[in-house]
Amino acid sequence: MNNNLQESAKHIPIMTDQVVEQLITESNGFYIDATFGQGGHTRALLENTDKDALILGIDRDSTAITRGRCLFATEQRLILRHGHFSALADIAQEFQREVNGILMDIGISSDQLDDAERGFSFSQNGPLDMRMDQESGMPLSEWLASASAADIAKVIKDFGEEPYADRIAAAIVDYRKSNSIVTTKQLSALIVNSQPRRPLNKSHAATRSFQSLRIFINNEMEELRQGLNAAAGLLKNGGRLAVITFHSLEGRQVKDMKFGMKAVYKSKPDRSEILSNNRARSAVLRIMEKIN
């Protein structure tokens, strides 16, 4: 393994062995990692394909692409592009090759969550942004400054299934009458104080709300829908789509796929992987195969 691949290996991608085993159908094929992130799954694809293979890495976060171009600077088989799921077909058509496999690792990446300045985490204080692509869209703080209580509650209910959504939304609207909500600490405190005290063994009171607001501000469900449809159209017959999801809303979209795709594999991380990477605990890997 070269130094670039060793550096990217410090990140722990989820269910790498299963992804490689199920996704790679031809060692010289064209494969797309549509959620490049820190390059962990891309590294595995490179290590398990031959010199004639081509790997396209895409990420909506330009920071990931910039970092990846440094990490994989000497890897001639890898091309990186900045873009959303909804642009998948346009990006892939540039290469005029049949697509053997596509990977989508849905949701937030570890580096985004761990960077307080991105505003995704309720456990760290930072600006309330939450955009995966900081070159487009509206920061969460801006949306919360003007959204109605009804709209805020709907987002938290629909994308987070939060039973206290109405109380949380009312608290946000009341607070902003005299204060701007611009940090993750402010929002987290509002959410926590809107709910009854939780048992110590329960998840943090802000978990569902932060997840739902992140999904909304990044238009994640619509992006996923468009990405899945694009993937189904791009794959060659017998080509495979691997999707790693982390909650039921994402999983439902994958299960409901049509367009000549059939489910061929489903797996969750085993106990040893969860122990070494706690963020893998809710992951589900689904493999779909193009049949016509």
Image (tube, rainbow, N blue to C red):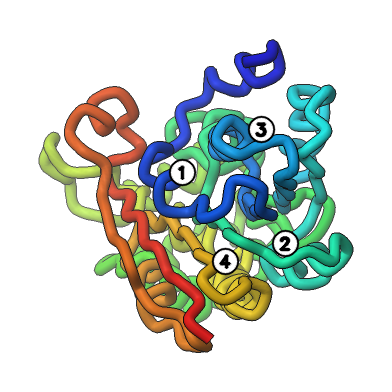
The answer to which of marks 2 and 1 sits earlier in the sequence is: 1
Q: Give residue 173's position: percent from left, percent from top.
A: 52, 66
Residue displayed at 88% across by 64% down: 94
Residue displayed at 72% across by 53% down: 60
Marks 2, 1: nearer the viewer: 1
**Disc 2 residue type?**
His
Q: Residues within 10 Å of mark 2 (few under 14, many from 20)?
A: many
* Separation of residues labelled 2 and 3 (CA atoms): 21 Å
The answer to which of marks 4 and 1 sits earlier in the sequence is: 1
Q: Secondary structure at mark 4?
A: helix
Q: Secondary structure at mark 1?
A: helix
The residue that mark 1 highlights is: 20
The residue that mark 4 highlights is: 220
The answer to which of marks 3 and 1 sits earlier in the sequence is: 1
The residue that mark 2 highlights is: 84
**Which one is nearer the viewer's eye here, 205 or 284?**
284
Q: Residues within 10 Å of mark 4 (few under 14, many from 20)?
A: some
The reply to whether the C-beta atoms of the residues labelled 4 and 1 are less than 8 Å apart is no
User: Any mark on residue 117, and which?
Assistant: 3
Give the left or right position of residue 166, taking residue 96 as reference: left
* Separation of residues labelled 4 and 1 (CA atoms): 25 Å
